[in-house]
Image (cartoon, rainbow, N blue to C red):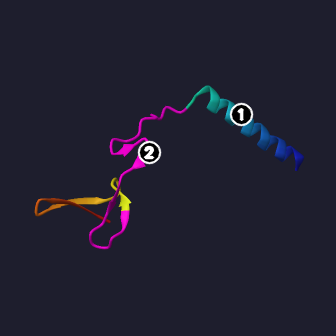
């Protein structure tokens, strides 16, 4: 049992060391429709629910822009 715990600890330390040597290449820049503080919320005119603008379906109805769930 102790061998298994030591093996798990060794694996974790090796993984942590590998992550420190090769950091993730993900960009820290937020997506275009998100600000540094988060994403803008919009209200669905049908049900009144608020949702992030990135998840909403948009439509132009009679010259007005609407967002739906």
User: Which residue does the numbered mark 2 point to in the structure image?
Assistant: 37
Residue at mark 2 to residue at mark 1: CA–CA distance: 35 Å
Q: Residues within 10 Å of mark 2 (few under 14, many from 20)?
A: few
Choose between 23 and 51: the one closer to the eye: 51
Residue interval drawn in magenta? 24-50
Quadrant hosting residue 17: top right
Where 6 falls versus 57 (above or below)? Answer: above
Where 23 falls versus 9 (above or below)? Answer: above
Give the residue at x 83% y 46%. 5
Of badges 2 and 1, nearer the viewer stands 2
Quadrant hosting residue 53: bottom left
Percent position (x, y) of residue 52? 37, 56
Give the residue at x 64% y 29%. 20
Q: Main secondary structure of the magenta part?
A: loop
Q: Is residue 46 magenta?
A: yes
Choose between 44 and 31: the one closer to the eye: 44
Look at the image and tell me in which quarter the C terminus lies. bottom left
In this image, 20 relative to 56: left or right?
A: right
Q: Is residue 51 magenta?
A: no
User: Which residue does the numbered mark 1 point to in the structure image?
Assistant: 14
């Amino acid at each position: 049992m102790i061998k298994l715990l030591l093996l798990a600890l060794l694996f974790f330390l090796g993984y942590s060391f590998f992550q420190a040597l090769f950091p993730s290449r993900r960009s820290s820049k937020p997506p275009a429709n998100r600000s540094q503080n988060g994403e803008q919320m919009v209200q669905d005119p049908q049900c009144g629910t608020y949702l992030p603008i990135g998840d909403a379906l948009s439509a132009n109805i009679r010259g007005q822009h609407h967002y739906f769930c």
